[in-house]
Image (tube, helix red, strand yellow):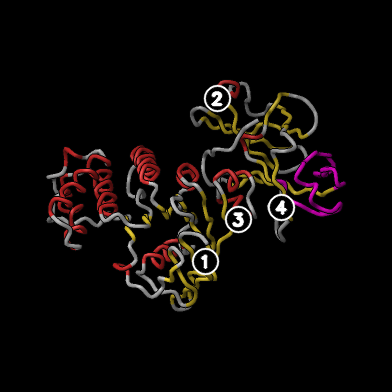
Amino acid sequence: MAYLEVRNVRKRFGDVVALNGVTVSVEQGEFFTLLGPSGCGKTTLLRIIAGFEEPDEGEVSLEGQDISGLPPHRRDMGMVFQSYSLFPNMTAEENVEFGLRIRRRPPQERARRVAELFELIGLAHARKRYPYQLSGGEQQRVALARALAVEPRVLLLDEPLSALDAKIRVQLREEIRAIQTRLRITTVYVTHDQEEALAISDRVAVFSRGRVEQVGTPSEIYQRPANAFVAEFVGTMNRLEAVVRDDSGGVDYRGLRLKVYEARGFRPGTRVLLLIRPEAIQLQPGGTGLTGRVVSRVFTGATTRVRVQLDLGGQLVVDVPSAPAKGLVPGLEVAATFGPDDVAVLALPEEPSVGQATQRSPSGPGGAR
C-alpha cells in the first residue's frame, strides 16, 4: 500500500466535471508532481488531498487510514500557496512560528524549530522583517518554512513559483527540491510548467480534462508518452503518420522505408504515429532518405531550432547545436536521420496532424543522439 493514495475521486462544480475517477498513489519520501494545463483538475485534486474540498465520490488515505472525512487541521499536512498568504502584520519569524504557537508548543521548542528553518531556507538575516520588506522569492521561502514548521507528514505545493520571474523560479525550484531531498518529506507539487515538472520530480502525473493521462518518471513521460496528448503537452514533438510493414520494425512513411524498433509491437498494416523529439534528429546537407529544405532557423542560445519542409510533405522541427547550425541556411537541401530507438509509436488517432511538430516548450531533457 502506498503512503498516500487517492482512489476513484470524482468532483463536479455544477455542470463542470473537475475530476473524473482519478486514482494516484504517492510513496513515502517521494516528490510527486501533478502536471497539466489550466482547468485540468490538478489544483482541485490537491485541495481534496488537503481537505479544503470534499470529493463527490472516492477517498483519500494516508498511511492506510481513510482521511476523506477529516478537516484540514487534522490531516497533518503543510500547504504552500501560489500567493504566499503570509500574515502582513507579522514578521517572517512570527509567520513561521504561528503554527507551532497554535499547537501550544513550548517556547524553547518553538525558538529552536524556527531557527533551524531559517537556516534551512537561507534567510536567518531576515527573520525580523515584515512580508512587505521581502522579495517574492524570499516570501515564498518563508511560506515554505511555515508549512514545514509543524513537521507535516505531507507537503503540498500549489504552483508556488508561478508569480516569480524566470531566473528566481529556477533557483527556488532547485532549493525546494534540495530541501525536500534533505528532509525526505512526501511532497505533492502542482504546476503547469513542463520543464519545472521534469526537472524536480521523482514521478509525474499528467492531467487532462479531469483525468490522469500518464504517470511515470520524467524520462518516461518525455521519451515514451502514453498518448498523443502527453506527447504534445510535454515539450515539442514531431509527428509522422506511417504504416507498419513487418514485425521487425519496418514502417512506411509516404513510400520511404524507415526502421523503428517500437513498431515491432504492432501488426503489419497498422497505421501509426511516429513521435520524434527535435533533439533526436540529425541534419546533413545533401544525402538521401528523409530529405527536405531548411525553411527557417531560430537561435535560442546553446541550440538553434531549425524547421525543415520535407519533400514527402509535412515539416520537421530539429534542435541543432548552435555552432554547426550556422551552415543550415534557409533553402539548403538536407537529409534528416534518427536512430530506430529514438522514436515512440502510438496507434493513429482519428484526426492526426500529419508530419507536423507541436510546440509546447522550447527545450527538454531528452537524450539526443
Q: Secondary structure at mark 4?
A: strand
Q: Is residue 282 left or right of residue 246?
A: left
Q: Earlier in the sequence, mark 1 or mark 2?
A: 1
- Disc 1/disc 3 C-alpha distance (Å): 13 Å
Q: Secondary structure at mark 2?
A: helix
- Can you tell which of label 2 and label 3 is closer to the viewer? 3
Q: Earlier in the sequence, mark 4 or mark 1?
A: 1
Question: Which residue type carries mark 2?
Answer: Ser
Q: Quadrant of residue 359?
A: top right
Residue matched to label 1: 210
**Dot 2, how many residues are within 10 Å of its Cα: few (below 14), some (14-19), or many (20+)?**
some
Question: Which residue type carries mark 1?
Answer: Gly
Residue 140: tell me if it is visible: yes
Residue matched to label 4: 346
Residue 169: tell me if it is visible: no
Residue matched to label 2: 322
The residue that appears at 60% across and 34% down in the rendered structure is 367
- Disc 4/disc 2 C-alpha distance (Å): 31 Å
**Dot 4, how many residues are within 10 Å of its Cα: few (below 14), some (14-19), or many (20+)?**
many
Q: Earlier in the sequence, mark 1 or mark 3?
A: 1
Q: Quadrant of residue 181?
A: top left
Asked if marks 1 and 2 touch (Cβ < 8 Å), the reply is no
The residue lying toward the viewer, choosing from 119 and 223, is 119
Mark number displayed over residue 229: 3
Q: Is residue 27 left or right of residue 164?
A: right
Q: Secondary structure at mark 3?
A: helix
